[in-house]
Image: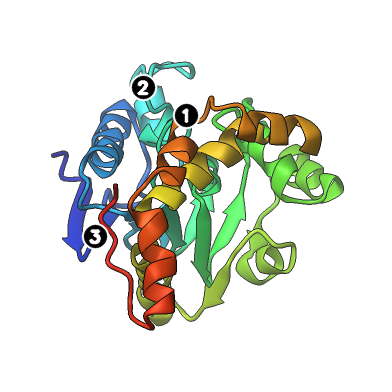
């Protein structure tokens, strides 16, 4: 494993920590290491959710400009998961929580935007300054941000590169939680524990259904849902866990999920 990417497992939660001083910037090698961690999440049935976070005052400063100066191309191949190993990992069917400990700049912001849930320290800031560097936020920023914020606010961030503080980001609905910096790890773990306590097959089905119906009308989405083309949804409907949940509720006990 690349020493810039540390992983830790605790009760079904995989914590992935970017530790690449000074700014947790990401080059191709780091993207590949991050992708390996997310593949581990996908393939290990004991893992239910991941937390991605950083060390120091940066969550991530995004693309490593020193690598660019050394010859890494602006359109370099960052591997099958795209930039940061995750921004184009569209088939991942387990949730990821971004725990933004500090500055999320450029590709660092885009990495956080790719997560399912986002919590942040109240000192965190977010920005897509690519236009000031002769580039654009094409690792998800230009695609995801207008879906997450009012169009005028998304346009302002993309076109000016200004920074948005955590309190403002929370006000616009971009964040699930804003907490003091020392409370951030526990806030992320609490969300992760709630996911771990839920049944695994509905989580996978939810991710698949939302992904496949995102651009459809409600009527079209129902047709997709009922058409038998979503294997995770079909597996959930036919699962032992779908019987165990109601049975445990009726018997006033905690369910025992089998993932089948």
Q: Position of residue 130 (x, y in %)?
A: 62, 34
Q: Is residue 132 left or right of residue 68?
A: right
SS under mark 2: loop
User: Which residue is denoted by mark 1 in the rendering?
Assistant: 88
Mark 1–mark 2 contact, CB under 8 Å?
A: yes
**Is residue 100 depicted above or below 204 in this figure?**
below
The image shows residue 25 at horizontal and vertical percentages of: 38, 42
194 vs 255, nearest the viewer: 255
Q: Which mark is residue 174?
A: none
Q: What residue is shown at x 45% (from left), y 56% (from top)?
A: 98
For label 2, count other residues whose C-alpha is less than 10 Å away and answer few (under 14), some (14-19) or many (20+): some
Residue named by callout 2: 80
Q: Position of residue 152 (x, y in %)?
A: 86, 47
CB-based contact (under 8 Å), mark 3 and mark 2: no
Which label belongs to residue 12?
Answer: 3
Mark 3 vs 1, N-terminal side: 3
């Amino acid at each position: 494993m690349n020493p810039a990417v540390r992983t830790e497992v605790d009760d079904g939660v995989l914590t992935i920590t970017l530790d690449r001083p000074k700014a947790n910037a990401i080059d191709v090698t780091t993207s590949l290491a991050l992708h390996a961690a997310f593949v581990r999440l996908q393939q290990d049935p004991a893992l239910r959710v991941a937390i991605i976070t950083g060390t120091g005052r940066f969550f991530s400063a995004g693309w490593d400009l020193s690598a660019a100066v050394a010859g890494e191309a602006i359109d370099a191949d960052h591997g099958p998961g795209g930039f940061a190993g995750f921004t184009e990992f569209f088939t991942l069917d387990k949730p990821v929580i971004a725990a933004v400990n500090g500055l999320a700049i450029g590709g660092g912001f885009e990495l956080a935007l790719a997560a399912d849930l986002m919590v942040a320290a109240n000192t965190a800031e977010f920005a897509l300054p690519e236009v000031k560097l002769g580039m654009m936020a094409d690792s998800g920023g230009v695609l995801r941000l207008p879906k997450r914020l009012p169009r005028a606010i998304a346009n302002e961030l993309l076109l000016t590169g200004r920074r948005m503080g955590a309190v403002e980001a929370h006000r616009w609905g971009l964040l699930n939680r804003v907490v003091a910096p020392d409370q951030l790890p526990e806030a992320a773990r609490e969300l992760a524990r709630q996911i771990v306590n839920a049944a695994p097959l509905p989580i996978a089905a939810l991710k698949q259904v939302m992904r496949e119906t995102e651009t459809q009308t409600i009527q079209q989405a129902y047709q997709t849902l009922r058409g038998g083309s979503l294997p995770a949804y079909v597996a959930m409907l036919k699962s032992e866990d779908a019987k165990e949940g109601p049975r445990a509720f009726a018997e006033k006990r905690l369910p025992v999920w089998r993932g089948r």
